[in-house]
Amino acid sequence: MCLRNKKGRLWTAVLLTTLLLSLALLPSQLVYGQASIGTLADCARMAFSTEEDFIAHDAAGKIIYVSDGDLLSPDGVICARNADLVRVFDVNEDLGLDAVDVLSVERNLVAFSTELDSPHGNFTAGDLLATNGAVIPNKALVMPFGVYYDMGLDAVHFVVRDLDSTVGFLNEVKSKGRDYWLREGALQGALRQWGVDVWFSTEGTAPQVGQPKFLDGDLLSARDGIIVIGQAALLPNTVPAGIPSRGVDFGLDAFAARTRDVQTARERGLFSTEILYWPDEGTGFTDGDALKVGDLISSTNWDLIQAFQPLASELGLDALSVATVGPPPECYAALTALGGTQAPIANLNSQGLVDLGYPTRHPFGNDIPFWGYLASCVSKFRVVYRAAGNTGDGTPILPGPWNVGDPLSWDPVTMTCVDVMPRPSPDAAGYYDAAEYAWLRQCDQLPLTSWNTYDEIGQVSIVPDGLYEVRLDYQVGATLNHSPWYRVRVDNTLPEIQALGLVASAGSPGGSASCPVYSTSNMPLMLQGQFRDDYFWRYQATIDGDLYPAHPYTVTNYYDGTPAAANLDDTGTTPDGSLVNLHHVNVYDIVSNPADCCYSIEVKVWDRAIWGWFYGYRAVVGGYVGRWVEDDIYFAFLP
């Protein structure tokens, strides 16, 4: 296991001036991304801050300095500069951002903490602040635990019955001033009065003889003075988290949940740790990943920061907030799933890749069907796409002629529609009739539409590989409504096996270059390979010869951390352009007494695209994860 200390923060005017001067000297042609400066509304879905400052670029190639005090969106938008957050306290310096909860983008209300004390002395780095000017002293938060000094503030999440209660509570906090809340019990009384609780973590562990009162990795309740979720419960049993039983306090640097409900937030929260965990075997995580309570990675740090295209792939995660959700309205429509495996649309990240539960993310290829929900109030709908970065209304996705079950041919014995009929065509603008669609679904579970991106007959992409955005348009009465744009990565390019080789462990081969001859003294052979794909996933070697049953070796994923994966990354073999060692192969793995014969090593290489099929007959959808290519290398064996 590797441990990384939480960074210290030291700012001087000389250091900042030097940094800004160096940025000005960087060549403008080094354009790595399309970061932008937006508004708090751009962080309505998710907001976070990093532990480190870094450099991003806008679409024009202009350098953008991103501070660890700025509030960021995984879409590559700086939603608020640190100055925007602390301005209400008459502060002009960047004080960092250690915790955040975006309470309302409409009311511009954010709760947060800083990494540095105010230069005016009106708050400390451990105080809980709000953009309405409220200050809750850190001492007031920890007082119910019998602690009477500032312990810092690393994570915050409000649990409350409604937004009005939150606003009323924070307005009272502001009106009474910081010192008022230093009275014992004052904060807890106000929290109970307004039906609010503040969950938080500290930067330090509360000391006590024998067993600490709480760890800096525990999630605490400011109202009730209890541990809401202990360190051991945050992480699965496979991680040695918790003191004293499991041995390590990983810290709690951020906490967020898509709900203000106590039980649901406790069960489904997201968080980050202060140190990373990278075991010799199994799955680990970094202190920049967003983790699920009781589980592991929900979003990697790269998932969060890649839209900014920084020159480092790991920048830490100091603060995190996600949009809260509630019951749906009575009248709405939504995209729910896509692709040949019906992947949840909610699992798409900012790069259009979907989480399927593997330690990686997946693009889409060939046919990409879309499923959704249409309330009975919806009169018509369509799904449109556009290239990412385009600002237009998109192009309707139309699957062409397809057949569906005819509801007039319902057979009560087989419980199916016996006959088929052509799918009714959309109107000139690409809209389907929603009532008609609901009628057809009595026969088959139809997708809303299917996006054909690849011509399997011609083996060419109809839609070029790249990042796209899709949206559901639907009409209710006379009003046209739109779902959010969702990013979808199209990848129709197969993996490429560029070279294969064999290296003898001892002795030297004879025979020709195309079919070398090996003996017992040469076994085992080292299989070498060179292959690549933008979204590489795994490979497998299989040895075969004579009429013996073939012997497949273990499938190796690039993230396995085994010797067979040592020279892999998420784009294939590494370094690029070189034959690298992959896996030992041995004729004795086939049979104990192998014959004098020719043998082959077959190598299969998979990408991780979700490859979908849409059949025009009754709109049947199929698909699988991971397309593959294969190649062979041959040799002779002389016992």
Image (cartoon, rainbow, N blue to C red):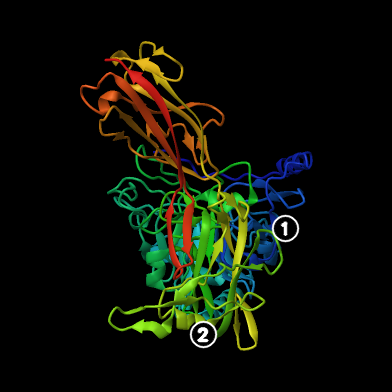
Please tell me whether mark 2 or mark 1 is closer to you in this view: 2
Q: Is residue 277 above or below residue 600?
A: below
On residue 435, the disc is 2
Count of numbered tags: 2
State the SS at label 1. loop
Q: Nearer the viewer, residue 82 or 582?
A: 582
How packed mark 1 is, by other alpha carbons closer than 10 Å (few <14, some 14-19, many 20 or more), is some
Instruction: Give, as a three-letter code, the residue at label 1.
Output: Asn
On residue 399, the disc is none
Where residue 23 sits in the image (x, y, percent)? 75, 42
Marks 2 and 1 sit apart, C-alpha to C-alpha, by 57 Å
Q: Nearer the viewer, residue 133 or 237?
A: 237
Residue at (63%, 41%) from the top-left corner? 311
- Left or right, residue 346 beside residue 95: left
Where residue 320 sits in the image (x, y, percent)? 53, 59
State the SS at label 2. helix
The residue at which mark 1 appears reads as 92
Q: Are marks 2 and 1 in contact (CB under 8 Å)?
A: no
Residue at (35%, 46%) from the top-left corner? 248
